[in-house]
């Protein structure tokens, strides 16, 4: 009997859309997909077909080493994305890569672009005008942000629920008021270290966004107790407040929120110390040590 030579089966012979993509490629991290598409032309086609239908794209863990030339090639047919995480792609990501991608993915719900320093307002304008269903946007450390950028978000993305524009020099009271007016469903807002903000901007957010749950105004040294009291009055759903570095926000302003159990990033002074100090002042024991200079 003649020996039968077993036929070698190739992985690529399995159904791509029914087997390989949902049960194999969907479980591989992006770094391994990049390696796989270098094996041969057919694997490259398989990987690109998979990425064209992907709902999530997260480059944050490979951002510094991701080849810029691969970005447009790999995602040139992508049109089903719901989440886009490009945090840390500051060394290579520009409007030339971002704008075509967001204009093809009109159903984006989340976009994280923190510290993408080579982008410009044009990139954010494309995002706001192309993705009306956007719910979360992260722009921390984007120094190019301008007041008109937040106006564009307010007008183009009325369903926005989370917005982080911390460490952005272009954030002002006026543009924050526009954001609050255009996105009344906002539940999380980060404006840490936005030094131009005053009570006016924070109060506009408090009055315009009653569903607010998380607010970060740490480092906003112009904000005072008056704004915090307004937040306490108009934001019954608030769960956390960050005020470290706000030198004009003190315990009297935070007392109502602490009483409601809101998590605050600075500890309250020990109650017995406050009582003791009050007793000493009332008894006049500290008067000889107080030096008043006019």
Image (tube, grey):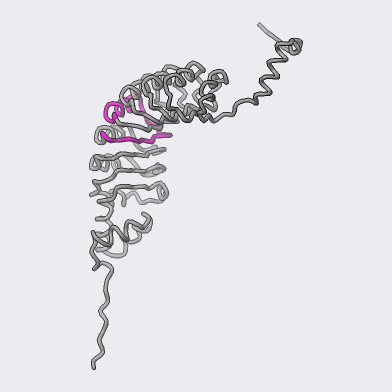
Left or right: 249 as drawn, with respect to 110: right
> In the rendered view of the protein, which quadrant contains the N terminus?
bottom left
Query: How far across and down, in percent of the image, does residue 194 sit?
Result: 45, 26
The total of numbered circles placed on residues is: 0
Query: How far across and down, in percent of the image, does residue 14 sit?
Result: 25, 66
The part of the image, by quadrant, that contains residue 81 is top left
Query: How far across and down, in percent of the image, does residue 41 sit?
Result: 25, 63
* Residue pictured at 35% horizontal, 57% vertical: 27
Compare residues 281 and 78 and report the one nearer the observer.
281
Query: How far across and down, in percent of the image, does residue 76 sit?
Result: 24, 49
* Residue pictured at 49% horizontal, 28% vertical: 241
From this view, report whether residue 207 is shown above or below residue 149: above
Report the magenta residues as a range: 132-158
* Residue pictured at 40% horizontal, 32% vertical: 164
Compare residues 93 and 9 and report the one nearer the observer.
9
Left or right: 195 as drawn, with respect to 51: right
Compare residues 275 and 225 and report the one nearer the observer.
275
* Residue pictured at 60% horizontal, 26% vertical: 268
Question: Which residue ends up furthest to the front in the rendered image?
Answer: 260
């Amino acid at each position: 009997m003649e020996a039968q030579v077993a036929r070698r089966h190739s992985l690529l012979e399995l159904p791509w859309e029914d087997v390989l993509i949902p049960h194999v490629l969907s479980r591989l991290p992006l770094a391994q997909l990049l390696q796989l598409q270098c094996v041969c032309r057919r694997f490259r086609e398989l990987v690109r077909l998979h990425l064209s239908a992907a709902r999530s794209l997260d480059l944050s863990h490979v951002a510094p080493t991701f080849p810029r030339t691969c970005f447009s090639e790999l995602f040139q047919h992508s049109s089903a994305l719901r989440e886009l995480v490009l945090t840390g792609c500051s060394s290579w990501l520009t409007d030339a890569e971002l704008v075509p991608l967001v204009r093809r993915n009109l159903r984006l719900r989340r976009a994280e672009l923190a510290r993408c320093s080579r982008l410009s307002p044009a990139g954010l304008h494309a995002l706001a005008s192309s993705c009306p269903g956007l719910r979360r946007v992260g722009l921390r450390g984007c120094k190019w942000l301008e007041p008109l950028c937040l106006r564009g978000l307010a007008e183009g993305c009325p369903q926005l629920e989370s917005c982080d524009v911390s460490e952005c020099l272009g954030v002002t009271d006026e543009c924050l008021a526009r954001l609050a007016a255009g996105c009344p469903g906002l539940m999380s807002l980060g404006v840490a270290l936005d030094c131009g903000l005053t009570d006016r901007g924070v109060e506009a957010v408090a009055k315009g966004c009653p569903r607010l749950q998380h607010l970060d105004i740490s480092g906003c040294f112009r904000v005072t107790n008056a704004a915090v009291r307004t937040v306490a009055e108009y934001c019954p759903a608030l769960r956390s407040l960050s005020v470290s570095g706000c030198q004009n926000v003190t315990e009297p302003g935070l007392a109502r929120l602490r009483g409601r159990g809101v998590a605050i990033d600075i500890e309250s002074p020990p109650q017995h110390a406050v009582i003791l100090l009050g007793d000493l002042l009332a008894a006049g024991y500290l008067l000889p040590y107080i030096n008043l200079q006019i």
